[in-house]
Every structure is written in structure tokens, then in C-alpha cells.
């Protein structure tokens, strides 16, 4: 029996290339790979043509889906290459790391754990006091690759690894075993620098290694003759030598807590492989490593050609001559820096200098799109998953909705049945808290109720969110209904009205009846007018969506009318003595309720019935002479009543508000309330504009300093063309005022002789000109 241990770096294409060559040479009859041992049942799906990396193993607790971890793989990951090599060559293969059933409990029991999944970098995540430890030992414990790089005279572990491993083109080299024996020896030396661990205080890392040895022993006991173990380089020394007695490892593993878990494959992305995403075993440049794996010949030339194509797609002028010069520069830099092959640093410098002309924004674009990359993997549709995920996949396939990491806009016309189905699905996903697809702004000019715009951006962690949502039901509809019913049982009045809006948009009739009954009961008991005002707009919008989708909303309309009547009764007492912040909040609530009335009562009531709109406006009209209402709110009420043609003396009221002996700040608050969103009013009503201009002109220096921020905030809400038009109108008013002043000061009797003389001169000159033109 022979045992070969291949210590690799996770997600390293150089390691993967050397590993494949070593496996071809060794021809093992058993391959053991670092990964959760209880994921063996799903290994076979890695051989499917529909499973395309990057992908990840997902392990989660069915009774608590948030208790989960991912084990990501790229096509250039040594683990993935060894896995597919074994499946391709029909060699027994399995994972040999601590089962997820144990690892999840241990990982989430540690304080400060992020739950991103085992990283295999030699750190078990436990807190260790390194302050008094030798710096070299501390570095070896935290980052063994950085320690090796420092010993080799490198200040950058990534560059050292690229030079020693990723830039290798000889695969197995002169030893016939590749770089693995040397890496194992180096890691063994590093581990020898660390103090021994007391078995009684062993952490997760020690248990992981004990379990790996147990799996090796099991393979030997099963009669395997040529065993290959693929693991993180840090673990290789304790697996490659003669195995210690099994009793110590068995004792270490005895009594470990565990819980039931489910494992499956999920799509992953290159961006989530980057350590910038927070992934513990991440790499700096997944896109670059993918290129090194797929472009074995002339990788620098091919890479810079891709960079040029990306820049041309963004209208940056890049010629073939630019690419040639960039290749030459990258290769020259590699020679000057003593590197065997131009690496990412050299091609990035060449890109910056030649292709991007020093533009850092363009370099950042290349980093995001190519160096890191946005590649999204896929898994076989038959991979076992939760029923909710299967239903979602089927619906997305029928509605032609792709899971893409690139933002995609969906402009929907709800008059079309196909787009209405899409809208229902999107709203149901929002009910479930799956923010894969979110409302967005549209470039389409129409803003009718039949138009919706959404944007979809897929992220790998959404796979776990779907698992968590699966606790509510087996289909998107039943899960969304159950989620809404949970809100009904626990939600406040405002949450219930928001739920009603979501219910109608998502077309969930099974939840609507119970929702309306609960809503009516809570509305009758809630006496806080603020709650009533916050609850009304969502109900009004829900009625609109009921009209669009053809849903009966009569019961909803009855609750809305009841809320409005109660608001009208309670609001006058609630606006007394508000400070500025609360007055502005109340103003927004008044605007929201006022805007909702047209949705609640789209048509005039029958003869003899009191209109809800009239009741609301009459209630507001009772405020206009009150002195206990804040100016920001009172100005807004006067504006609402003016627009509704209830008040016809707006200029007089503006004049009165700006002229009585109140502080300038109070006047500015009234102006802000009245003219908020009122650019057209100022543009078309010269009298109001002149009043406002005169008020500002009459402010003294201190008053102007006090009110400037308030007035500026008012005008900041106007568009730039509106502000220019108002400025032109003000200028016209002032010019007209100056002309009137001149005309009033002119004595026509005294100026008569002079004007007659000028007219005579001009007339004589005109006659002479006509005579000259005639000749």
C-alpha cells in the first residue's frame, strides 16, 4: 500500500495543473479530498455536463436553514480537478474532512464566526493571544504562505505563490511528483515552529486532521493499494508521514456534538471566490486564475487581447498596436523584476500605461470585469434541492427569467398576461424576502398603473435564502401566503396595511380574507392618528392594484373609508404645538393621505352623500386661521386648499404670512410648506412671485443668514430648468419695476422741446436715407 498526500492551495490553477499531472502519473485507486465527508452522496453530480463551475457545496440544518456553510469550487480549484479526474477515470472518490454535521455545530458555536464555511487555511477561528509570540511563529500560525514568502525574501505572499507555483509550466518537474513534496516539507518546518497542542485543549483544526487520518485508515482497511489525499498544504505534514495510533484520534473525535444536515450543490460566482467578499480562503483574482487555467499557451497575449476587447466595448480606442506594446511592456517588466513569467502585477501595469493611458477608472473596470470576474456557475437541474427551489426554477424557466450576476432590467406591461405573471412572481419573491429582483426606475416614458420596472441581480447567497424561505411552503405561492399569514398574526396596523398591498400585488387570495378581517379589527382598536395616517396610503395603493389585476377590493375600500373618517376626526387635535421636525413629518403624512383620497374615492358619491374629499378639505380648512399650527404644516395646508380651489385668496394669505411680526425662520417654514413642489405656481403666478421676491429683498443681513438654508432647501426641490425660469421671471419683474420708476419720475412737459428736436433730427436723417436709396 502506498499513500501520496498532495498539499495544495485552495483555488490555485498552478496547484491544479500539477495535481492533475501527478494523479495521471500515480493512478490511485482511491482519492480522498478535503471537504465535508457527509457530502459524498452528491459527488456524482459533479460529473454532469450541466454542472459548470464555479459551484459550491451547501450544507444546512433543515430545522434551522440559517445554520449553513458553503464550500466553493472553481474550475481551476485543485479539489474540483481531483474530483472530476476521479469521476472521469471511474476511481473511488470521497471527502475526508470533518462532516458538516459536526463542523456546523463547532463553527457556529465559536464567538465571532461569520459562517462562511471552512477555509482550510490552517486557522480554526479560535482566539489566540499572539502578542508575546515570536513574530515568525505568529505569522506561520496566521498565514503559512506569507511566512514562506517572507523566508524567500518576498513581501507579497501572492507574488511568491505565483512565481513558485502558478507560473510553473513543467507540471511534475524533475522529481516526477511536482512541487508537493517540497511544499509538504516546508509546511512541516513551519508547524514545527509552533508550540505543541495539548490534546485536552484541541480545537476544530486538530479534530479535522484527526478525522482525515481516520478516513485514510478506513481506506487502507478497505484494501486500497494506491491512496491519494488532496488537502490544504497546511494539513499535509500530519497526513503524509506514518500515521499515529488510531486510539488518540478516536478519543479526540469521541462525543463531538452533531445535528442533522442536508447537502446539495448551488451555483457560485467568481466575485464570491475573491477574498474581498469576506471568504476566508479567497483569492485576489479569480478571473485571472481562470484565464491561466484555460489559456495554457501565450496567456499574456490572450489576456491583453481580452482587455482590449472589454475597453472597446466601453468606447475606449484601443488598436492592435496597443496590444502588441502592452505585451512587450508586461514581458519586459517581468524580466526586470526577475520573474519567470509576467504575472497579474505586470499585465496590470501594462494595461494601465498602454491600454488605459493612466486612467484609473478604466483599470478599475478591468479589475471588476476580468481580474475578479462575474462568471456564474450552474448545477444540474436534477440535483436534490428543496421543493421551493424546484418550483422557482420551473417558473423562471417558463417566464424566461435568468439568474444573472449582471443587473438586468425588466419593463412590464400589466395589460399583457405574460408580464402580469412575471409581476406576480416578482412580488411574491419580495414577500418572501428574496431580494433577487427589486423595483427600479425605468427609461420608459409611461408612468401609468399598468407599468412596472424591475431589476434582477443574482447573488450566490440567495440559494441559502431560498432554503430558509422553504420553511414556509413547497411552492412560491404557498410559501408567500404562509409568510403573509405570519405577518397577519404578529403585525401592527401599519404592517397589516403594507401586507394588504403586497397581498394584492402578489395575487395571494388565500391570505386576503383573513388579512382584511384582522385589519378591520385592529383599525377599530387603534386610536393613534399617526398610525392611521401611515396605514391609509398602502391601502389606497392596494385598491389601485386590485383594479389593475381585476381583484374585488370592496372590503378593502370599506376599511380605507373608515380610516379616513377617523383621521378627519382626530387630526385637528394632533397638530397642536409640533416642533419643526415633527411638523415636517406630519406634513408628509398629510400629503400622503391627500394623495390617497383619489384612489379611495375615484368617483363622486351619489346625491346627498358627503364626499370623503369634501370632508377632508373641510377639516383642513378649519386650520388656516389657527396660530398653534407650525408654519411648515400651515403653509402646506393653505397650498393644498388653494390647489383644490377651496381658497381663492392665496396671494393675500402669502402676503399676510410674510408681513406680520413673526421671526424670519417661521416665515421661511411657511414658505417652504406653501411652495414645496410648487415651481409651476411661482412660474405662472406673477403676484405670488413678486411677493416672495419682495420679502427676500426686505430681509436684513442677519435674517437673510438665518433663513437662507430653509429657502435654499425649498428651491432645491425644483428642477434646474424650473429654477432658471423662476430666475428669469424675477429678473423680468425687477426690470419692469425699474421702468415704472423711470416713467413715474419723467416730466414730459419739461422734456417736450428736447424730444421734438430729437424727433426732427431722426426724421431728417430718415428722409435723407430714403432719398439716397432712391437714387
Image: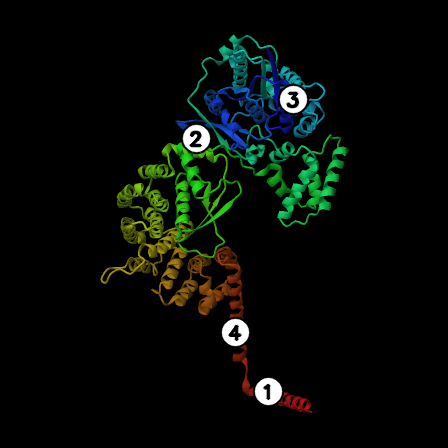
Q: Secondary structure at mark 3?
A: helix
Please tell me in which quadrant of the rendered image residue 766 appears: bottom right
- The residue beneath circle 2 is 385
Q: Is residue 759 above or below residue 338?
A: below
- The residue beneath circle 1 is 755
- In the image, which is nearer the foreground, mark 3 or mark 2? 2
The alpha-carbon separation of the residues under discs 1 and 2 comes to 98 Å
Q: Nearer the viewer, residue 184 or 5?
A: 5
- Mark 3 and mark 2 in contact? Answer it, CB < 8 Å: no
The alpha-carbon separation of the residues under discs 3 and 2 comes to 47 Å
- The residue beneath circle 3 is 135
The alpha-carbon separation of the residues under discs 1 and 3 comes to 100 Å
Q: Earlier in the sequence, mark 1 or mark 3?
A: 3
Q: Secondary structure at mark 2?
A: loop
Q: Is residue 651 above or below residue 208?
A: below
Point 32% across, 39% down: residue? 488
Residue 312 x, y percent position in the rendering? 64, 48
Residue 85 visible (yes or no):
yes
Please tell me in which quadrant of the rendered image residue 341 appears: top right
- The residue beneath circle 4 is 736
- In the image, which is nearer the foreground, mark 2 or mark 4? 2
Is 179 positioned to the left or the right of 230 in the image?
right
Q: Earlier in the sequence, mark 1 or mark 4?
A: 4
Amino acid at each position: 500500500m502506498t499513500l501520496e498526500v498532495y498539499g495544495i492551495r485552495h483555488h490555485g490553477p498552478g496547484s491544479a495543473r500539477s495535481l492533475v499531472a501527478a494523479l495521471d502519473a500515480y493512478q490511485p485507486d482511491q482519492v480522498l479530498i478535503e471537504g465535508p465527508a457527509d457530502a459524498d452522496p452528491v459527488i456524482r453530480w459533479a460529473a454532469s455536463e450541466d454542472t459548470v463551475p464555479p459551484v459550491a457545496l451547501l450544507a444546512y440544518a433543515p430545522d434551522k436553514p440559517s445554520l449553513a456553510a458553503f464550500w466553493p469550487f472553481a474550475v481551476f480549484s485543485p479539489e474540483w480537478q481531483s474530483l472530476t479526474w476521479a469521476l472521469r477515470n471511474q476511481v473511488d472518490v470521497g471527502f475526508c474532512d470533518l462532516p458538516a454535521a459536526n463542523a456546523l455545530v463547532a463553527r457556529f458555536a465559536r464567538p465571532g464566526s461569520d459562517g462562511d464555511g471552512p477555509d482550510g487555511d490552517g486557522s480554526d477561528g479560535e482566539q489566540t493571544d499572539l502578542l508575546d509570540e515570536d513574530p515568525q511563529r505568529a505569522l506561520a500560525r496566521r498565514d503559512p504562505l506569507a511566512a514562506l514568502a517572507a523566508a524567500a525574501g518576498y513581501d507579497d505572499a501572492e507574488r511568491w505563490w505565483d512565481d513558485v507555483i502558478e507560473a510553473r509550466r513543467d507540471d511534475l518537474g524533475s522529481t516526477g511528483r511536482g512541487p508537493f513534496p517540497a511544499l509538504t516539507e516546508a509546511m512541516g518546518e513551519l508547524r514545527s515552529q509552533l508550540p505543541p497542542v495539548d490534546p485536552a485543549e484541541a480545537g476544530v483544526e486538530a479534530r479535522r486532521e484527526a478525522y482525515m487520518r481516520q478516513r485514510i485508515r478506513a481506506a487502507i482497511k478497505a484494501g486500497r493499494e494506491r491512496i491519494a489525499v488532496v488537502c490544504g498544504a497546511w494539513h499535509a505534514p500530519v497526513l503524509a508521514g506514518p500515521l499515529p495510533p488510531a486510539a488518540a484520534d478516536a478519543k479526540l473525535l469521541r462525543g463531538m456534538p452533531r445535528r442533522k444536515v442536508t447537502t446539495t450543490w448551488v451555483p457560485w460566482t467568481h466575485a464570491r471566490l475573491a477574498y474581498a467578499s469576506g471568504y476566508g480562503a479567497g483569492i485576489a483574482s479569480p478571473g485571472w486564475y481562470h484565464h491561466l487555467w484555460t489559456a495554457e499557451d501565450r496567456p499574456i497575449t490572450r489576456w491583453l487581447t481580452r482587455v482590449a476587447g472589454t475597453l472597446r466595448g466601453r468606447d475606449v480606442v484601443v488598436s492592435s498596436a496597443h496590444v502588441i506594446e502592452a505585451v512587450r511592456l508586461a514581458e519586459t517588466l517581468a524580466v526586470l523584476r526577475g520573474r519567470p513569467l509576467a504575472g497579474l502585477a505586470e499585465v496590470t501595469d501594462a494595461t494601465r500605461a498602454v491600454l488605459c493611458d493612466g486612467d484609473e477608472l478604466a483599470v478599475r473596470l478591468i479589475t471588476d470585469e476580468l481580474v475578479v470576474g462575474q462568471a456564474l456557475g450552474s448545477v444540474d437541474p436534477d440535483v436534490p434541492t428543496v421543493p421551493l427551489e424546484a418550483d422557482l426554477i420551473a417558473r423562471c424557466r417558463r417566464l424566461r427569467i435568468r439568474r444573472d450576476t449582471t443587473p438586468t432590467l425588466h419593463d412590464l406591461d400589466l395589460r399583457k398576461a405574460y408580464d402580469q405573471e412575471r409581476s406576480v412572481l416578482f412580488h411574491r419573491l419580495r414577500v418572501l424576502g428574496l431580494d433577487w429582483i427589486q423595483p427600479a426606475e425605468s427609461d420608459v416614458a409611461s408612468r401609468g398603473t399598468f407599468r412596472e420596472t424591475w431589476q434582477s441581480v443574482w447573488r450566490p447567497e440567495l440559494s441559502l435564502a431560498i432554503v430558509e424561505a422553504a420553511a414556509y411552503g413547497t411552492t412560491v405561492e404557498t410559501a408567500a401566503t404562509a409568510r403573509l399569514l405570519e405577518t397577519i398574526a404578529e403585525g401592527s396596523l401599519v404592517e397589516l396595511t403594507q401586507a394588504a398591498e403586497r397581498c394584492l400585488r402578489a395575487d395571494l387570495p388565500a391570505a386576503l380574507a383573513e388579512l382584511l378581517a384582522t385589519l378591520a379589527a385592529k383599525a377599530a382598536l387603534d386610536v393613534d392618528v399617526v398610525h392611521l395616517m401611515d396605514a391609509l396610503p398602502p391601502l389606497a395603493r392596494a385598491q389601485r392594484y386590485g383594479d389593475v389585476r381585476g381583484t374585488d377590493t370592496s372590503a378593502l375600500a370599506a376599511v380605507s373609508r373608515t380610516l379616513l373618517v377617523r383621521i378627519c376626526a382626530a387630526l385637528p387635535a394632533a397638530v397642536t404645538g409640533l416642533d419643526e421636525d415633527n411638523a415636517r413629518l406630519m406634513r408628509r403624512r398629510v400629503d400622503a393621505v391627500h394623495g390617497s383620497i383619489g384612489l379611495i374615492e375615484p368617483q363622486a358619491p351619489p346625491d346627498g352623500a358627503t364626499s370623503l374629499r369634501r370632508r377632508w378639505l373641510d377639516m383642513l380648512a378649519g386650520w388656516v386661521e389657527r396660530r398653534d399650527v407650525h408654519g411648515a404644516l400651515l403653509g402646506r395646508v393653505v397650498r393644498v386648499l388653494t390647489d383644490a380651489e377651496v381658497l381663492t385668496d392665496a396671494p393675500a394669505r402669502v402676503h399676510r404670512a410674510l408681513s406680520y411680526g413673526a421671526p424670519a425662520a417661521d416665515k421661511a417654514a411657511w414658505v417652504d410648506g406653501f411652495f414645496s413642489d410648487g415651481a409651476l405656481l411661482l412660474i405662472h403666478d406673477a403676484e405670488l412671485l413678486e411677493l416672495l421676491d419682495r420679502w427676500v429683498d426686505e430681509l436684513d443681513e442677519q435674517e437673510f443668514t438665518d433663513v437662507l438654508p430653509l429657502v435654499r432647501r425649498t428651491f432645491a426641490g425644483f428642477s434646474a430648468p424650473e429654477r432658471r425660469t423662476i430666475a428669469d421671471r424675477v429678473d423680468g419683474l425687477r426690470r419692469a419695476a425699474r421702468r415704472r420708476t423711470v416713467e413715474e419720475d419723467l416730466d414730459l412737459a419739461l422734456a417736450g422741446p428736447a424730444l421734438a428736436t430729437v424727433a426732427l433730427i431722426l426724421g431728417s436723417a430718415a428722409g435723407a436715407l430714403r432719398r439716397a436709396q432712391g437714387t
